[in-house]
Amino acid sequence: MRRITRALLAGAMVLGLAATAVQAKTYYWISHGSPADPVWTYFLQGAEQWAQDTGNTVNTSFHNGDVASHQEALRAAIAAKADGIVTTSPDPGSLVEVAKEANAAEIPIINFNTPDPTASFDAYVGGDNVVFGASWAQYLVDNGLVKQGDFVWMPVEVPGATYGVQEEEGIRSVFEPLGITWEVTDATLDQAEIITRMSDYLTANREKVKAIIGLGDLVTGSIKRVFDQVGVKPGDIPVVGWGNSLDTTQEVLEGYVNAAQWQDPQATSYVALSLAAMEAGGVPAGFNVITGALYDKQAAQIYDDILSGK
Amino acid sequence: MTTRTPLERLIAMPEFGPLALLLVEIALFTAINPTFLSPLNISNTLTFTVELGIIALAMTLLMTSGEFDLSVGSMFGFAPVLMWTLFNANILPFGAAFLVAMLVAAAIGLFSGLFVTRLKIPSFLVTLGMLLVVRGTSLYITDGFPQRTWSAEGTWLATILVGDFYVGPFRIYASLFWFIGLAAILGYVLNRTKAGNWIQAAGGNPLAARARGVKVGRVKVALFMLTASCAAFAGMISSIRTSAANPNSGTGYELEVIAMVVIGGTVLTGGRGTILGTVIGTLILRVMRNGIVLIGVPGLAYNIFVGAIILGMMALHSWLERRHNAGV
C-alpha cells in the first residue's frame, strides 16, 4: 500500500513539474544601459519583480551602449524561440533588421525606455525623450529662469547616445526660436570623473551659465557635489533634468535642483513584460504606454520614498 | 674633471623634460584663462589628481620591475563597494570594513603576482583577466546598485582619509598629504634602499638579478600587492569624498595611470623608474584635462584635444629625452 502511495505521489510530482514547465514561459529583457547606472538597477528590479509575480523566467542582459552586442543578444533570444522580448533601442535605427527577424519568427517584441519608431516593434512602453527635453526647456522658460540670449549648459554621460540626442532635439525646439544657446559636454559614466569634469566646467563658465539641464541621471545626481565643490549655493543656478535616483530626489528637496523627471523605471519594465506576455497569449498590443512625470520640491518626497523602498 | 653648475645638474635630471612640459602647460593655460591659477581651480584640480596619483606611484615601482597591472581601475571601484557593503549591512564597523577591503585587495594582488611569477603568464593577460573578475564581482555583490556612503561623514577614519580644511582661499583635502607621504616613502625606497635596487634589477635584467641573489619573483609579487592595495586605498578615499561607491567606478583608470607613469619618465619595459617623474606626469595629465575645459574647447571635442595634446607631449618628451641622452 505504502509503495502504491509513494508511486502515486511521485507521479503527481512529475505531472506537477511538467505542468509548471508548460505554463512557465521565458522572456528576454535586453537593455543598452549599464548595470552600474543607478537608474538601470530600478528598471532591472521591475523585471525581476514581474518574474517573481508571474512565475515566468526573465533572462536579463545589459550591453553598455554596444549595438553589436545588443543585436547579438536579441538574435540569441530569437534563436532560443523566446516567448517574448522586451528591449531598449541603443541607437535610432539600430534594431530595424532584428525587429523584422523577431516579427518573422512571430515572437512578440516590445520596445521600452528609448523609442525607435523606425523599427517594427509591437508596442512602446516608457517616456518620450523628445517630449521630456522640450518640457525641461519649457519649464525654465515658463518660470522665467532663462530668457533670450542666455546660455544653458547640458552635461551628459554618453554624448551621442539616443537619450541625449532625443532630449536635445526637444530642447532645441523650445530654445532655438527664443535665441537661447546651449552646449552639451561629455561627463563620462564614472562618478569621480563626472564631478571633476563638471566642477572644471562650472569654474570656467560660472558667469556664463544661466541654467543647467542634466541630460542623464548620473549628471543630475551630481549637482549637489559639484555646487558644493565650486561654491555655488542651492538655487543660484536653476537646474532641471533626470530624477530617477535618490541623489536627485534629495537635491530637489534641498533646493539644488528645481525640477526633475521621473520615468517610472520599475513600472516601465513591469508593464513592458506584461505587454509581451499578453501578446504571447494571443492578444495583440496595438497601443503604446507613455510613462513619466516632472516633479518639484512639493512632490519629491513621493519619489524619494519609492526609491528608498518605503 | 669639470664640475656642473646647479642649472646644468637640473637639466641633466631625467625629470627635467616632464617638468619643462608641465611648466609650459601651466603657462599656456594661464595665459589663455587666468582663472586657471585661481585658488578654487587649483584646489579642485588637486582633489582628484592625488587620488589617481596614489595608484600611479605604486604602478611606477611595478613597471620599474618590468610588470604592470591592468586591474587597478576595477580595484578602485571594487574596494569601496566591498567596504560599504560590509558597513551598510552592519557586518563590520567602518574601520574594520576598511581594513578588510585593504586585505582583500592585497590578497588579489598576491594572486595576480603568483600567477605572473609562478605560472609565467604575462602580466598583461593575468591582470586583464583579473580586471574582469574584480569588476564582475563588484557588480554581482551589489546587484549593480551603488552603495550609500552618507553615514561616513564625521567618522574618524573619513576625517583622516579625506577631511578637508582651508589654508587661506585653498581647500586642502587630507588625501593630498597621503599622496605626498607615499611619494616620499616610495621615492626613498626606490632610490635609497636595497629593495629599490632589487626592483630596478628585476626589471632591467632579471636573469642577472637572479644570478646575484635577488629574489625576483618575491619582489614582483610584493609590488603587485602594493599596487592593488594602493588602488583600493585610492578608491576608498575617492568614494568617501564623492559620497558614492559605484561598482563601475575607475573604468579606464588603468590606462590613464600607465600614461602618467610613462610620461613621467619610467620606462615601459622596466629597469628604470622615477617617483618624482610620476608625480610630474600625474600633474601633466590632470592639469591638461582641467586646462582644456578652462580654455573653453567645445564640450564634445574634449577627447580630441586630450588625445592630440598627449601625442604632442609624447613627441616633445621624446625630443627632450634624446637631447638629454646626447648630453645637450
Image (cartoon, rainbow, N blue to C red):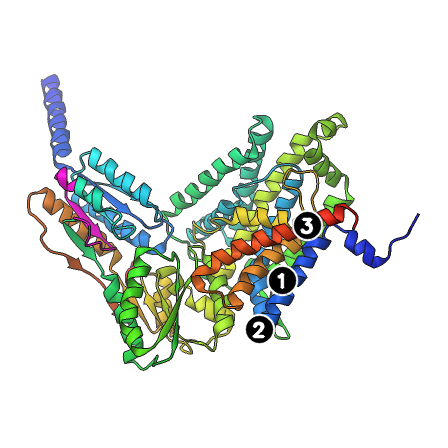
Q: Few, some or many C-alpha atoms within 10 Å of disc 1 (few <14, some 14-19, many ≥20)?
A: some
- Labels 3 and 2 in the same subunit: yes
Q: Few, some or many C-alpha atoms within 10 Å of disc 3 (few <14, some 14-19, many ≥20)?
A: few
Q: Is residue A116 above or below residue A225?
A: above
Q: Is residue B102 left or right of residue B89?
A: right
Find disc 1 in the rendering and name its residue.
Answer: B25
Residue A273, position as x, y percentages in the image:
18, 48
Give the main secondary structure of the magenta stretch: loop
**SS class, disc 2:** helix
Amino acid type indicated by mark 3: Trp
A114 in the magenta segment: yes
Which contiguous range is marked in magenta?
A102-120
**Camera sees residue B165:** no
A230 in the magenta segment: no
Q: Is residue B208 left or right of residue B77?
A: right
Q: Is residue B204 left or right of residue A183?
A: right
Give me the disc on residue B35.
Answer: 2
Q: CA distance from mark 3 to mark 1?
A: 17 Å
Circle nearer the N terminus (3, 2): 2
Q: Chain of mark 2?
A: B
- Viewer-side residue, B323 vs A170: B323
Circle nearer the N terminus (2, 1): 1
